[in-house]
């Protein structure tokens, strides 16, 4: 089947009392296997919220029998904390949890990608605030998500989506070559 890719993002609204987490799992050719918009209670700093989102996104995949080899997020500080094994401070226990989950996945790798390359997960994170509940999709992905102009779902119908996919893929490759 090839390697799976997991994209994760979070949305924070301080006044809401919760964060929104967006999760998208794709197969090796970019087809979406599942997606989720998760509601997570708490008043969290942006960094802690991003850490929690990565942890919860990985747990979502594992709990549904999926083993992504690549995890992507637009939270560069989380990726750096994982690379540096920074387990101190308030976020330390969550970063340690993420590290253990990555080991459980057979040392899956976590990479930084630009926001425009993570728009699908970001849209799902924001969806939580409009919908006010957690929701997951396994058999069909909602049209509002697949028609998003910045989404990186592989679409043979739209040239702009294809070029965005290639741009994001190239950007991620170059970033990974420098680390």
Image (spheres, rainbow, N blue to C red):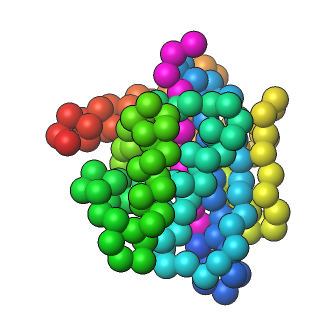
The overriding secondary structure of the stretch rendered in magenta is: strand
Determine if the magenta segment contains residue 2: yes
Q: Residue at x 57, y 41 (%)?
A: 151
Q: Position of residue 28 (x, y in %)?
A: 52, 20
Q: Position of residue 68 (x, y in %)?
A: 53, 32
Q: Residue furthest left?
A: 178
**Numbered range of the magenta stretch:** 1-11
Q: Residue at x 34, y 54 (%)?
A: 82
Q: Position of residue 139 (x, y in %)?
A: 81, 29
Quarter of the figure with residue 148: top right
Q: Residue furthest bottom?
A: 15
Counting every numbered tag in the picture gives 0
Q: Residue furthest top?
A: 1
Task: Evaluate whether residue 127 shows in this view.
Answer: no
Quarter of the figure with residue 145: top right
Q: Residue at x 79, y 40 (%)?
A: 137
Q: Tell me the quarter of the image containing the N terminus.
A: top right
Task: Evaluate whether residue 96 shows in this view.
Answer: yes
Q: Is residue 117 above or below residue 158?
A: below
Q: Position of residue 100 (x, y in %)?
A: 45, 48
Determine if the magenta segment contains residue 151: no
Q: Tell me the quarter of the image containing the C terminus.
A: top left
Residue 40 falls left or right of residue 2:
right
Residue 152 falls left or right of residue 109:
right
Q: Residue at x 63, y 59 (%)?
A: 21
């Amino acid at each position: 089947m090839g390697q799976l890719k997991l994209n994760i993002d979070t949305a924070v609204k301080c006044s809401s009392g919760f964060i929104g987490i967006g999760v998208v799992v794709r197969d090796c050719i970019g087809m979406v296997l599942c997606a989720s918009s998760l509601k997570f209670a708490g008043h969290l700093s942006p960094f802690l919220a991003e850490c929690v989102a990565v942890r919860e996104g990985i747990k979502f995949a594992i709990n549904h029998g999926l083993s992504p080899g690549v995890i992507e997020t637009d939270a560069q500080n989380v990726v750096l904390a994982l690379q540096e094994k920074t387990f101190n401070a308030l976020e330390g226990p969550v970063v340690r949890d993420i590290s253990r989950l990555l080991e459980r996945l057979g040392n899956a790798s976590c990479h930084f990608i630009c926001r425009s390359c993570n728009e699908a997960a970001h849209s799902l994170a924001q969806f939580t605030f409009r919908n006010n509940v957690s929701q997951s999709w396994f058999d069909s992905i909602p049209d509002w998500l697949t028609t998003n102009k910045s989404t990186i779902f592989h679409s043979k119908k739209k040239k702009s989506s294809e070029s965005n996919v290639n741009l994001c893929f190239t950007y991620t490759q170059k970033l990974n070559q420098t680390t």
